[in-house]
Image: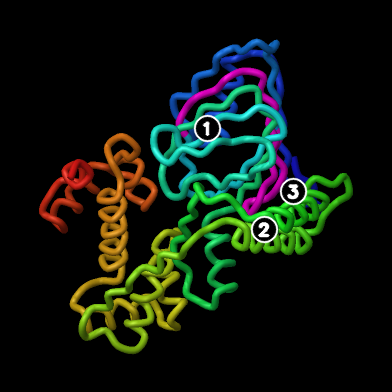
Amino acid sequence: MTTPTDPRTVFETSGSDLDAARAVFEEAYDGDGFLPERSARSFDYRFRSVGDPSMSFRSTRFDARMTGTVDTPDEFSVTWVSDGGGVLDVGRDEVALVPGRPVVFPSGRPFRFDLADVRQSLVQLDRVFLERVAAEAYGTEPGTLVFDHTVAPSTPALRAWNHAVQESARVVLGSTPVSTLALAETARRTALAVLSTFAHRIVAPEVPVPAGATGRVRQAVEYMHAAANTPITTTDVAEHVGLSIRGLQQAFQRQLGTAPNAMLRGIRLDRVRDELRAGTPNDTTVASVAVRWGFAHLGRFSAAYTRRFGEYPRDTLRS
């Protein structure tokens, strides 16, 4: 629910039905194969989320065991528990979730979890938003953020994090109306706290500018690489470099012998290939990666991928 004067969206649900709980949490975390199992406690659950598209605070009470796979490619999340716990990234780079230690979700891939009887809190940040804040903070072009969830924050960093979260929670979870500007500033401060607390690196993609690309064509190609993970179109690219769509198309044909939309599609295909080569069939599917990079028609995607790389996408993943 929202009001004209308050940009926050609030979602809250609770109950005592295991199947209903499974459905709620699978949807909230883009999950798969969530399997609830009763524990010694009388079963009850509650889930609450408050925030906007840039950032939300979530809280969970779950009096049972739950296992499953989480896949949130468009978000970064930090979680901590005040009761109960378990393991994140089961079978891979396992980290215990215990009271007193916040943990950032593994970056850029699905991961398995096994939790029981938790009182859990979570801060969720939009991926593009956090990567843009990181670029501003470090004075670089936006790049892919990769967090190392196995590194525990230092004691001073943990104290600073707890203070920052408390300050942000007072704004986001407070009972008084919040302005759009106040919520945006709170999200930015929280993003900076995440960056200063949790070990990470920025993988700035190399920008292979084709030979012959100069001036605005070169700027357009660089912009395509930087924003390939967002829903930009040829129109956006033309506006970014100050050309009409026809002017951009003519410049691309003259300098590169190709169309801007073909260049953008090729860049996204390259990103798909990078993800498939980095993943394994156990934690990655061709369909999920293709859809994430804007290829909704899997048949056409497979044909375009094969033409570009000389192999089927499933073969890239298996290798």
Q: How crowded is mark 1: few (under 14 residues within 10 Å), some or many (20 or more)?
A: some
Neighbor class of circle 3 (other Cα within 10 Å; few <14, some 14-19, many 20+) is: many
State the separation of the CA atoms marked 3 and 1: 31 Å
Q: Which region of the structure is painted magenta?
A: 48-69
Q: Distance between the residues labelled 2 and 1?
A: 22 Å
Front residue of 299/219: it is 219
Residue 288 higher or lower than 6, as above or below: above
* Dot placed on the residue nearer the N-terminal end, 3 or 2: 3
Residue at x 43%, y 66% (from the top left corner): 227
Q: Mark 2 points at which residue?
A: 157
The quadrant of the image that shows the C terminus is: top left
Q: Position of residue 96 (x, y in %)?
A: 55, 36
From the viewer's perspective, is residue 91 above or below residue 251?
above
From the viewer's side, name the closer residue of 109 and 11: 109
Give amino acid for label 1: Val
Q: Where is residue 266 in the image (x, y as percent from the top left)?
A: 26, 63
Q: What residue type is labelled 3?
A: Arg
Q: Main secondary structure of the magenta part?
A: strand
In screen coordinates, is 40 left or right of 74? right
Q: List the residue tagged with mark 1.
A: 87
As drawn, which residue projects farthest toward the bottom? 215
Q: Alpha-carbon distance for marks 3 and 2?
A: 28 Å
Q: Is residue 270 magenta?
A: no
* Residue 8: assigned label: 3
Q: Is mark 1 on a helix, strand or loop?
A: strand
Q: Name the residue: 30% across, 45% down.
A: 279
Check disc 3 and report its element: helix, strand or loop.
loop
Q: 253 or 207: which is nearer to us?
A: 207
Residue sitting nearer the eye, 81 or 24? 81
Q: In this view, does 96 lie to the left or right of 215?
A: right
What colouring style does the render use? rainbow
Residue 21 in sight in this render: yes
